[in-house]
RNA sequence: GCAGCCAUAGCUCAGUUGGUUAGAGCGCCUGAUUGUGGAUCAGGAGGUCGCCGGUUCGAAUCCAGCUGGCUGUACCA
């Protein structure tokens, strides 16, 4: 016998930026997704699932300067055949591939919804992980603004289906053509366009004066002292851009007026203005007022592939943990060039993506999720080994009534079993020992009542009396098992 | 990516100018309690002080590197 060698044990650690999700989260997420999907399907969107992995060229994520080097922001690898593959980083690129591949069979316009995990190899931050869930709708093959309006409508309706009240959310629209037109009018050089768009996007964060600096000479962050290089525009150019992005109010009429006043002869700008006018008309026809859908000049949506209207859903209430407004929980827009990468033919498309975790987080903080979902309500305790079959029958009876029920399969006596029932959050304990079986009865204990009573004063002193009176416990004829459980479960709702 | 701060038990943290067997609270396990959880009491388990080097008679403590975390910033389909 050798000495007990200290084995090098594996460390049960999580890969950076990844996490485990447990029952309460998963059930709440499932409920939320289900409610949104019901809206999607009501509008004729149909489900699609595509694989987690795609070829990197399909995702379009090779670096522009080195066409065999995948973008650092995606999880890419090679396996047996020497081809680069990657975990998908959104659901839109796979959709484009799917549509291009099955173009002949799919009648256009094609509407689909899809939910699934996506992966991004970026710096993880609080509330931001490397694996997360998206819930998308898209309409491919329809160039009309009616399609964009449909997406906007579905987004608004989804928020309301989740119990988010009007005023607690805002669907915000802008238009990439309007932005392009504005940059054209201002005379913005092509090479600074990305910097300018990024700067405009930051107005919520740094304010109009911050944007002014970012568009001009650059800005030093007051907190960290970090300097961000500016776009180097002239003051006159900056004024025009700020006049748009910082226009008073974000109701649709003001937006349309502001754009009309700034856009001049720009062809892009005029086209964008026409799109937004039509959107406003359609939304009004549908009864979607400014309490639901607004036009917001600062919505840019990064440097993505968007070509027309862009949309973002913002939650307007304050996040109690950060003290800041909750912000964006969904985004999207029109992307008319994405499918054409495969087909060579222009294929218009528009859609949006809901960030499931962020939205769920918000619902939790709004108190619009039920924390007791996902917890099994009933435990059948087992005190008499010779009654194994009876205990199984009791549990089955509860299940047959549609109430989830766990049979205690651990060891130990009564204290241990009740302790278990308490810690795991059961609502009802089914108790049956020789006395009950003898009399054809069953005892039921209201665990939630006990939890409440234990908070009250005098609990500690009177323990003996408590044990004798067994508060919250009733003994009923065996036949009334289910009815009595229902009664106890109904007590504490609300 | 860049900058600043941080890393001691499952969790939150103490740990004196570097000094011998590293502590507390909470949690966990066992018993008082083989038919009653949440209270109370008694006992117990759990730490190579993130890792690796260096300075020193001696390092949780000082120094360098690494890893991980937090905050800000940049990027974000």
Image (cartoon, rainbow, N blue to C red):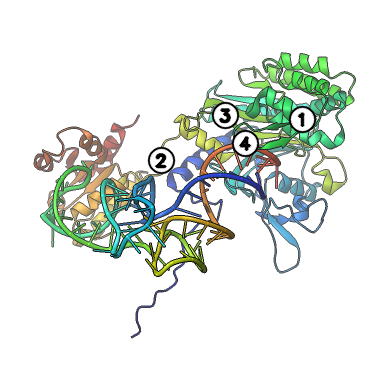
N-terminal of the pair, mark 3 or mark 2, is: 3
Residue placed under numbered mark 2 in the picture:
A373
Instruction: Specify the label residue A41 is tagged with.
Output: 4
Q: Quadrant of residue A149?
A: top right
N-terminal of the pair, mark 1 or mark 4, is: 4
Residue placed under numbered mark 3 in the picture:
A159
Q: Pinpoint residue A474: horizontal percent, then vertical percent.
A: 18, 40
Q: Residue under mark 1: which chain is it in?
A: A
Q: Are marks 2 and 4 on the same chain?
A: yes
Question: Marks 3 and 2, how far apart in space?
Answer: 21 Å
* Label 2 CA crowd tier, 10 Å (few <14, some 14–19, many 20+): some
Could you tell me if residue A271 is visible in this image? no
- Front tag of 2 and 4: 2
Q: Pinpoint residue A20: horizontal percent, then vertical percent.
A: 49, 51
Identify which residue is drawn at 77% across, 37% down.
Answer: A335
Identify the secondary structure beneath mark 1: loop
- Front tag of 1 and 3: 1
N-terminal of the pair, mark 1 or mark 2, is: 1
Identify the secondary structure beneath mark 3: helix
Question: Marks 1 and 4, how far apart in space?
Answer: 50 Å
Could you tell me if residue A163 is visible in this image? yes
């Amino acid at each position: 016998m050798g000495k007990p060698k200290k084995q090098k044990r594996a460390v049960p650690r999580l890969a950076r930026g990844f996490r485990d999700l447990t029952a309460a989260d998963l059930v709440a997420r499932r409920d939320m997704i289900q409610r949104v999907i019901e809206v999607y399907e009501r509008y004729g969107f149909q489900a699609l699932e595509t694989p987690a992995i795609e070829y990197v060229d399909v995702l379009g994520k090779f670096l522009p300067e080195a066409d065999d080097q995948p973008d650092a922001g995606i999880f890419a690898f090679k396996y047996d055949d020497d081809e680069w593959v990657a975990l998908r980083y959104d659901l839109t690129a796979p959709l484009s591939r799917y549509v291009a591949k099955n173009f002949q069979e799919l009648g256009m316009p094609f509407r689909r919804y899809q939910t699934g995990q996506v992966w991004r190899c970026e710096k993880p931050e609080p509330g931001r992980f490397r694996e997360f869930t998206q819930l998308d709708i898209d309409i491919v093959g329809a160039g009309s603004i009616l399609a964009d309006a449909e997406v906007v409508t579905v987004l608004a309706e989804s928020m309301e289906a989740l119990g988010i009240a009007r005023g607690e959310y805002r669907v915000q629209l802008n238009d990439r053509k309007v932005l392009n037109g504005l940059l054209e009018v201002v005379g913005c050089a092509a090479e600074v366009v990305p910097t300018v768009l990024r700067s405009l996007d930051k107005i919520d964060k740094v304010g109009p004066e911050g944007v002014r600096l970012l568009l001009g000479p650059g800005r030093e962050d007051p907190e960290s002292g970090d300097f961000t290089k500016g776009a180097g525009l002239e003051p006159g150019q900056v004024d025009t851009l700020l006049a748009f992005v910082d226009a008073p109010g974000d109701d649709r009429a003001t937006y349309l007026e502001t754009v009309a006043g700034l856009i001049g002869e720009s062809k892009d700008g005029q086209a964008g203005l026409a799109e937004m006018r039509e959107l406003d008309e359609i939304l009004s026809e549908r009864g979607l007022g400014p309490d639901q859908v607004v036009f917001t000049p600062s919505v840019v949506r990064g440097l993505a592939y968007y070509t027309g209207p862009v949309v973002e859903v913002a939650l307007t209430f304050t996040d109690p943990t950060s003290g800041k407004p909750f912000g964006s929980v969904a985004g999207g827009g029109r992307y008319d060039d994405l499918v054409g990468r495969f087909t060579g033919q222009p294929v218009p498309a528009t859609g949006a993506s809901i960030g499931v975790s962020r939205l769920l987080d918000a619902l939790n903080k709004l108190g619009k999720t039920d924390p007791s979902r996902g917890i099994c309500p009933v435990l059948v305790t087992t005190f008499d080994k010779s009654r194994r079959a009876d205990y199984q029958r009791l549990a089955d009876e509860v299940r047959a009534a549609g109430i989830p029920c766990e049979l205690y399969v651990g060891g130990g006596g009564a204290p241990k079993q009740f302790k278990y029932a308490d810690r795991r959050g059961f609502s009802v304990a089914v108790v049956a020992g020789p006395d009950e079986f003898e009399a054809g009865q069953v005892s039921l204990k209201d665990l939630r009542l006990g939890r409440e009573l234990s908070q009250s004063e005098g609990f500690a002193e009177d323990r003996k009396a408590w044990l004798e009176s067994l508060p919250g416990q009733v003994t009923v004829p065996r036949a009334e098992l289910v009815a009595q459980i229902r009664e106890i479960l109904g007590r504490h709702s609300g």
